[in-house]
Image (tube, rainbow, N blue to C red):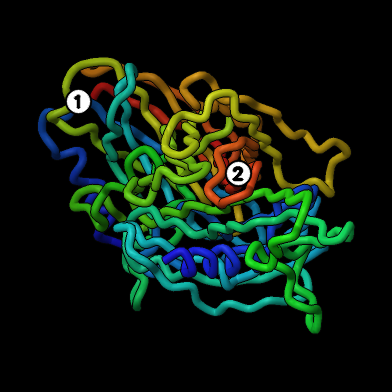
């Protein structure tokens, strides 16, 4: 758990990023709560291959099944790129997160242009939500809010 | 050789001819069509009924159901069981890619007269225990008159994908009515148009009538079926109104028979498609 906070701290130290995405996982007043699976990815605005920035799932699950069984519940992400990603993916895969605010850096090698930022969350015994917001690289900012499974999704230029 | 062919035709005639002249719908319903795990299993219901997808009439028959692995080789059907109203079986999706599961049925039905008495060829409906074996083409005597034979063949197949989708199992045989997907059948999304090409004997099936019916009939008043037609290029375009399971059925009657003395050929193609939310 602590190591994931350290990872987040690393975002700040990273040089020359094209921007930072901040995703809020809301605290939900439900009887049975499980942390959601979350995928964050970019698609070129004109269409094209998706680039996954992060996927948070049951990455440490032991036994025969490495935690990928429910990844297809992130339906849009799975269809648009998840299914062709070898998991766990270095720098992309991570454990599920508790409610709170999390930041992910846009890759430094991201080419300038117009993109759509996608954030999808799916929760066991809960709902699923896909939030999208257009953004430009570099120096773009963006802000939107999910309704159920996701809170604020923002993009800062740094 | 001729004898073998005759026996094959006779054997084929013993298979049920579900599509022929019956409103009952034969369907295969997979538990899901998109899988992300490394030890994924799909479980499939097989049944014959009017309302989709409710088992309330006859079970599907497992003997004719085959499995094609993503590389096109034969796969294995497991844990098969047949109940009063439905059959069920599992397939372990132990290789990544798109799998095909389904059956091909063919047969000959019809009638002839001997001394003014009409006799039927082929069985109607499911097999009844203790019933005499149905007559076959080989049983038509030389003095028969009014021989009317209809050849029928149909496919009922579903597609499920573990990991990234592949297309090897879409290879067509050039025989009968076949689906040649343009949109991958495991990539269907509500609100988006999907395109499928239908082929008859390997050539585009222009003007083919296709019915697409959403599941969940019990919980609404109307059937909400879509009656669609393929274009000159054999391509069908379907825009999915909502997410869910859909039953797709295409039928065609022509005179391009393969069985001697048959005057009519009935072809059918059936599949069940899962449409996901965007």
**Quarter holding residue A95:** bottom left
Q: How many labels does the image show?
A: 2
Q: Which residue is drawn at 30% across and 33% down?
A: A50
Mark 2 vs mark 1, CA separation in Å: 58 Å
Q: Residue at x 56, y 63 (%)?
A: B9
Query: Quadrant where the N terminus of chain B lies?
Result: bottom left
Residue B173 location (% of width, % of height): 39, 47
Q: Pinpoint the chain carrying mark 2.
A: B
Q: Tell me if residue A98 can be seen.
A: no
Disc 1 crowd rating (10 Å Cα; few below 14, some 14-19, many 20+) is many
Residue B145 location (% of width, % of height): 77, 53
**Quarter holding residue B141:** bottom right
Do the residues indicated by labels 2 and 1 lie within the same chain of the protein? no
| Residue topped by disc 1 | A18
* Residue sitting nearer the eye, B84 or B163: B84
Q: Which residue is drawn at 28% across and 47% down?
A: A84
* Residue sitting nearer the eye, B144 or B239: B144
| Residue topped by disc 2 | B267
Q: Which of marks 2 and 1 is in front?
A: 2
């Amino acid at each position: 758990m602590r190591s994931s906070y350290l990872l987040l701290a690393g975002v700040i130290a990273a040089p020359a990023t094209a921007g930072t995405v901040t995703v809020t996982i809301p605290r939900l007043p439900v009887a049975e709560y499980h942390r959601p699976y979350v995928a964050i990815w970019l698609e070129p605005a004109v269409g094209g291959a998706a680039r996954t920035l992060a996927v948070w799932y049951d990455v440490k699950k032991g036994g025969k099944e490495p935690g990928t069984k429910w990844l297809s519940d992130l339906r849009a992400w799975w269809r648009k790129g998840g299914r062709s990603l070898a998991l766990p993916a270095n720098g992309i895969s991570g454990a599920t997160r508790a409610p709170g605010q999390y930041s992910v850096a846009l890759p430094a090698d991201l080419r300038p242009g117009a993109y759509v930022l996608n954030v999808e969350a799916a929760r066991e015994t809960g709902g699923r939500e896909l939030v999208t917001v257009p953004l430009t690289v570099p120096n773009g900012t963006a802000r939107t809010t999910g309704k159920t499974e996701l809170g604020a999704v923002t993009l800062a230029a740094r | 050789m001729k004898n073998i062919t005759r026996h094959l035709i006779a054997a084929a005639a013993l298979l049920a001819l579900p599509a022929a002249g019956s409103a009952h719908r034969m369907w295969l319903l997979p538990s899901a069509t998109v899988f992300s795990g490394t030890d994924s299993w799909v479980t499939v219901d097989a049944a014959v009924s009017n309302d989709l997808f409710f088992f309330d009439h006859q079970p599907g028959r497992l003997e004719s159901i085959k499995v094609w692995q993503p590389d096109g080789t034969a796969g294995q059907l497991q844990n098969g069981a047949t109940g009063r109203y439905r059959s069920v079986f599992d397939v372990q999706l132990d290789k990544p890619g798109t799998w095909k599961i389904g059956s091909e049925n063919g047969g000959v039905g019809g009638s002839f007269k001997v001394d003014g008495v009409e006799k039927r060829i082929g069985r109607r409906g499911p097999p009844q225990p203790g019933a005499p074996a149905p007559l076959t083409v080989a049983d038509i005597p030389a003095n028969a008159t009014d021989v009317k034979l209809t050849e029928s063949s149909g496919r009922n197949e579903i597609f499920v994908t573990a990991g990234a989708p592949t297309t090897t199992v879409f290879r067509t045989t050039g025989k009968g009515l076949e689906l040649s997907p343009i949109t991958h059948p495991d990539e269907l999304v509500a609100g988006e148009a999907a395109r499928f090409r239908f082929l008859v004997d390997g050539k585009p099936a222009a003007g083919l009538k296709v019915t697409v019916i959403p599941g969940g009939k019990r919980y609404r008043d109307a059937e909400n079926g879509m009656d669609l037609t393929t274009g000159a290029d054999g391509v069908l375009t379907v825009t999915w109104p909502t997410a869910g399971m859909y039953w797709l059925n295409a039928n065609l009657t022509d005179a391009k028979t393969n069985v001697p003395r048959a005057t009519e050929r009935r072809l059918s193609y059936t599949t069940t498609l899962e449409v996901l939310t965007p």
